[in-house]
Amino acid sequence: MRLAIISAITVLAAAGASASVLTIDDCIDMALTSNNAIKASEYQTEQAGAMLKSLRANYFPDINATATGLYSNARGSYGIEGGNLPVFTVDGTGNPSPTGSFAYFPGIGLDYKVGPMFTAGVEITKPVYMGGRIKNSVKMASHKADMAAAALEMTRDEVIVSVTTAYADVVKAGRMLEVAKEYRSVVMELKANVESAVAHGLRHNNDKMKVNVRINEADLSILRARNALRLAKMNLCRITGQSMLTDFDVTDEFPKVELPAAIDNSDVIYDRPEWQALQANGRALKSQVDVVRSELLPQVALKAGYAYNYGFELNHTELFNRGAFAVLLNVTIPIYHFGGRSAKVTASREQWHQSQAEMRDKEELLTLELHRAYSNLEEAAAALRLSETSVEEAAENMRLSRVMFDNGMETLSDYLEAQLLWNKTCQQRVEAGFSLYTAHISYLRASGKL
């Protein structure tokens, strides 16, 4: 759907057709799809999930197949000469005593040859008790995965704020262009009347020059508004991952804003991904303390395997040519390490205490940010209401000023000033609408409802 929207916009722009109209949801979808910061956060989340799976595998036995080969041309022999050996007996005192007889010992001759040798087998290693290292390592990895997920949500929130602000900026620039055009049309209408009066000798040529000055100012305002609209569209294209030359239109109004009656006191800041990340970090550091403490506890591991050995020729006969099964139980008990491991536990515990203090401070800051965002939203809503009233009053003032000007009861300068005042109030209303929407987005983010 998102790719279809982008393709349609590009094709229409290239063909010179009328630009497509994008909604705020379309822009958010495109931005979330193409933003590189979100992609990096997604990779980080996948990495944390893979690390968690890796640590969970330590609960299961580790099975390995091993094989080792050796070839050597080493060879040699070893012999013991034969002969008559005396025969002893034990007397009544328990001491050996020669009997005077002899026994013939034929001697020993050993010829050895290394040649090819190899061993191959399968071994299974299973941790029995590791002082809680495996369990707490899995917990710590799980909490880090939660941190990565919260970081992804924070990145998405930042992108949503950026794209919605950029979208509202395009709407603002378009509205400013409309205001500039409306002001120019009002001044142009006055110019026609003044030129007619000058032609009939009812006004001086100086009045015509005054109106021309205001027309030049209106033309400059239109040029600035068009440039602002073009740059705002380029910025929105950049954020949404489109070509900078893509042409499109947006709705003429700012997205609707629903003002809350008051701040929701039901722990709304705890829904923010920033708070979720702090919580997950605290839990991960607590598990890290337990992981470091496991170095002070006994560790037990069981290892079993079957191996087949072949090689080493002795007197033209293979000495090793059979398989064997073996079981090994390893127990390690830490006794004393001159306080090194205990200091590591203390350092980890203090790091966890630091995170708790930082979390309490961050909680207060988030609460303050929420109240500040709500105050800004209230002020922006009040500013919009006042600006709408000001536009109505300025429009009525301009109407009355024109009536008085037509009847010769007011100068041209006063009427031009009334037009300028109406133009400024219209611009202020557009600014107030933009400020209200951006304040609303900030409040949603501060309350965890973005």
Image (tube, rainbow, N blue to C red):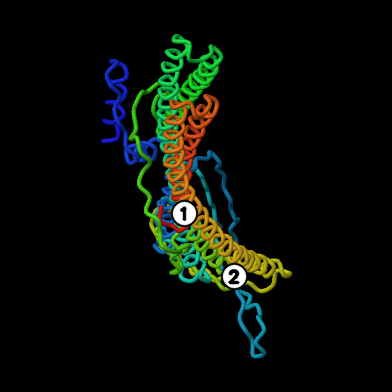
Visible residue check, residue 386? yes
Contact flag, marks 2 and 1 (Cβ < 8 Å): no
Q: Which residue is mark 1?
A: 443
Residue 162 position in % (x across, y down) = 46, 40
Mark 2: secondary structure: helix
Q: Is residue 40 above or below residue 258?
A: above
Residue drawn at (40%, 28%), measured in percent from left and top? Answer: 178
Residue drawn at (42%, 18%), measured in percent from left and top? Answer: 193
Q: Is residue 187 above or below residue 119?
A: above
Work out how far the residue at label 2 is from the one at label 1, CA to CA, in angstroms: 43 Å
Residue drawn at (49%, 61%), measured in percent from left and top? Answer: 280
Residue 115 position in % (x across, y down) = 48, 42
Q: Which residue is mark 2?
A: 293
Residue 312 position in % (x across, y down) = 48, 48
Q: Amino acid at mark 1?
A: Tyr
Q: Please state if 370 lies on the left or on the right of 326 as rendered.
A: right
Residue 86 position in % (x across, y down) = 62, 70
Q: Amino acid at mark 2?
A: Arg
* Category of crowding for the residue at label 1, using alpha-carbon neighbours closer than 10 angstroms: few (below 14), some (14–19), many (at least 20): many
* Category of crowding for the residue at label 2, using alpha-carbon neighbours closer than 10 angstroms: few (below 14), some (14–19), many (at least 20): many
Q: Please state if 76 lies on the left or on the right of 378 as rendered.
A: right
